[in-house]
Image (cartoon, rainbow, N blue to C red):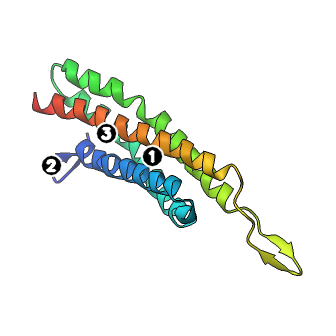
């Protein structure tokens, strides 16, 4: 089991997931609510979501390492692990939708009169932003649901 200053790595990595994915969900909600700000918010929100999604398998791996060192294997830990299996697919879908929003908003410039002018956003951009926001809310809810079971396993 990997440790940092004597602490198991799992609770340290989990904080990246717990902070970054819900923060990205809030950013996505703001981008969906304010189309004018979508171009400014989309890329930073995508990067935050990507960081959170990358942290998910790291948290899972370190969680399995921690679980192997525990004696007895509490049913609460098993429940936490089972719940955690839902997060990575949802986080990947969230990142994919955010990437689609960025792509739809930043289409190739149109050449007009010898110079390039920004292309208008795709008509799909608002729908993609709403879909990404909905999945972001689901991801944030999953993080809370999984985290609650993990906290219950530790403190019970």
Q: Position of residue 67 (x, y in %)?
A: 25, 29
Give the mark nearer the N terminus: 2 vs 1.
2
Mark seen at residue 121:
none
**Category of crowding for the residue at label 3, using alpha-carbon neighbours closer than 10 angstroms: few (below 14), some (14–19), many (at least 20):** many
Q: State the residue at coordinates (36%, 34%).
A: 142
**Category of crowding for the residue at label 1, using alpha-carbon neighbours closer than 10 angstroms: few (below 14), some (14–19), many (at least 20):** many
Q: Nearer the viewer, residue 155 or 139?
A: 139
What is the secondary structure assignment of the residue under circle 3?
helix
Instruction: Give the residue number, with chain letter if any, for mark 1.
Output: 53
Give the mark nearer the N terminus: 3 vs 2.
2
**Category of crowding for the residue at label 2, using alpha-carbon neighbours closer than 10 angstroms: few (below 14), some (14–19), many (at least 20):** few
Instruction: Give the residue number, with chain letter if any, for mark 2.
Output: 6
**Between marks 1 and 3, how big is the CA–CA gap?**
15 Å
Q: Mark 2 vs mark 1: give the one in front.
A: 1
Q: Nearer the viewer, residue 16 or 73?
A: 16
What is the secondary structure assignment of the residue under circle 2?
loop
Callout 3–callout 2 Cβ contact below 8 Å: no
Say if residue 26 shows up in the picture: yes
Of all residues, the one furthest to the right in this rendering is: 113
**Between marks 3 and 2, how big is the CA–CA gap?**
14 Å
Q: Is residue 94 above or below residue 113?
A: above
Q: Position of residue 94 (x, y in %)?
A: 51, 43
Callout 2–callout 1 Cβ contact below 8 Å: no
Q: State the residue at coordinates (27%, 42%).
A: 10
Quadrant in the picture for the N terminus? top left
**Between marks 2 and 1, how big is the CA–CA gap?**
26 Å
Q: Position of residue 26 (x, y in %)?
A: 40, 52
Say if residue 2 shows up in the picture: no
What is the secondary structure assignment of the residue under circle 1?
helix
Q: Is residue 123 above or below residue 152?
A: below
* 30 to the left or right of 19: right
């Amino acid at each position: 089991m990997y440790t940092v200053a004597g602490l198991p790595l799992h609770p340290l990595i989990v904080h990246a997931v717990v902070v970054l994915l819900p923060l990205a969900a809030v950013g996505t909600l703001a981008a969906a609510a304010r189309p004018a700000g979508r171009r400014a918010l989309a890329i930073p929100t995508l990067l935050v979501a990507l960081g959170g999604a990358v942290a998910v398998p790291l948290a899972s791996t370190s969680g399995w390492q921690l679980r192997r060192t525990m004696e007895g294997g509490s049913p609460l830990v098993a429940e936490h692990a089972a719940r955690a299996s839902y997060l990575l697919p949802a986080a990947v879908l969230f990142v994919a939708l955010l990437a689609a929003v960025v792509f739809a908003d930043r289409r190739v410039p149109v050449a007009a009169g010898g110079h390039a002018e920004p292309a208008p956003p795709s008509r799909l951009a608002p729908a993609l932003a709403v879909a990404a926001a909905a999945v972001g809310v689901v991801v944030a809810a999953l993080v809370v649901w999984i985290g609650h079971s993990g906290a219950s396993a530790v403190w019970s």
